[in-house]
Image: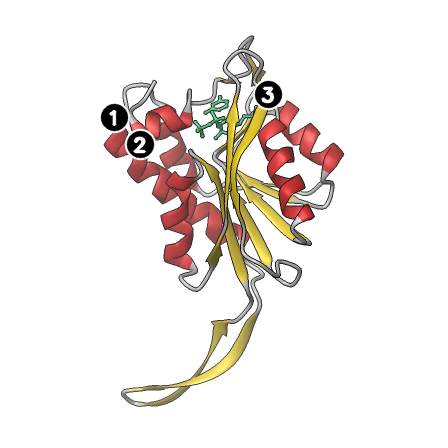
Amino acid sequence: MPVHLVEHPLVHDALAILRDASTPPEIFRRMAVRISLLLAAEATRDLPAGNVTVETPLGPASGRRVDGDVVVVPVLRAGLGMLDAVLELIPSARVGHIGLQRDEMTAIASKYYSKLPSSLGGSIVLMIDPMLATGGSAVAALDMLRDAGAHEVRMICIVSAPDGIALVEQHHPDVHIYTPVIDRGLNDHKFIVPGLGDFGDRLYGTH
Ligand code: PRP
Ligand code: URA
């Protein structure tokens, strides 16, 4: 499975701030937006674009405008912290939502919400979820996207673990994953180590 490790120094600068346990929610949210912009730019490098001519104040200039259909799908809740960044880059994108919640004891994800746009077959689908830990949530979300007709799915996450990468590879070998880092592993509670803690809780100030 293609895993794209994003090396940009600004990505890793934001990641270090996100990891820091002393980072307050307001800075955490800003860094989530910043890193998501950079990761989304990487994941959309080959977006289809058509030639255009525009009039500058000094005359015609040829250029390119993005013209493919893009669908962004945040996995709730934590994925919502990445959505505005992706929409800033691709304002015309359609948006689907998938709600999944990991059980605190078993770490098994269960679905509580799904609303996806129609006709996903010809779209580039960007699934955004900051944490890829056991991979259970990712595989459940990717199954739902496939069942809804999506063919071309890319996943953007901020921290990933070897287990999650392996599970996605096993179930969805054609999905490209864009991530800055593959951390050491998981602890007894299936949290990524060293990771950054509970992304949703840090984003929203819950625990
Ligand atoms: C987190 C995260 C992923 C999932 C990753 O969500 O946003 O969706 O855990 O873990 P996994 O790879 O082991 O499935 P969580 O279920 O904690 O919900 P939240 O976003 O509402 O906090
Ligand atoms: N979800 C999180 O928010 N963090 C982890 O480390 C694992 C799952």
For marks 3 and 2, the one nearer the N-term is 2
Q: Which mark is residue 122?
A: none
Q: Amino acid at mark 1?
A: Pro
Q: Position of residue 107 (x, y in %)?
A: 56, 18
Q: Which residue is labeled 2 in the image?
A: 28
Mark sitting earlier along the chain (3/1): 1
Question: Quadrant of the image for the N terminus?
Answer: top right
Residue at screen point 53% across, 18% down: 103
Check if mark 2's residue and mark 1's residue have beta carbons within 8 Å.
yes
Inter-mark Cα distance, 2 to 1? 6 Å
Name the residue at the bottom extreme: 59
As drawn, the label of residue 108 is: 3
Q: Closest to the observer: 109 or 86?
A: 109
Residue at (41% x, 58% y) in the render: 89
Q: How is the image coloured?
A: secondary structure
Residue at x 25%, y 26% (from the top left corner) = 24
Q: Are marks 3 and 1 in contact (CB under 8 Å)?
A: no
Q: Nearer the viewer, residue 38 or 116?
A: 116
Q: Amino acid at mark 2?
A: Phe
Horizontal and vertical percent position of residue 43: 54, 51
Quadrant of residue 185 within the rendered picture: top right
Label 1 packing within 10 angstroms: few (<14), some (14-19), many (20+):
some
Q: For the residues marked 3 and 2, what is the alpha-carbon distance in whole angstroms?
A: 26 Å
Q: Which residue appears farthest toward the top when viewing the image? A: 188
Determine whether, in the image, residue 11 is placed left or right of residue 117.
Answer: left
* Image position, residue 161 (x, y; %): 58, 25
Residue with the mark numbered 1: 24
Amino acid type for the residue under numbered disc 3:
Ile
Task: Residue at 66%, 54% (x, y): give it.
Answer: 152
> Could you say whether the residue bearing mark 3 is in a helix, strand or loop?
loop
- Image quarter where the C terminus lies is top left
Q: Residues within 10 Å of mark 2 (few under 14, many from 20)?
A: many
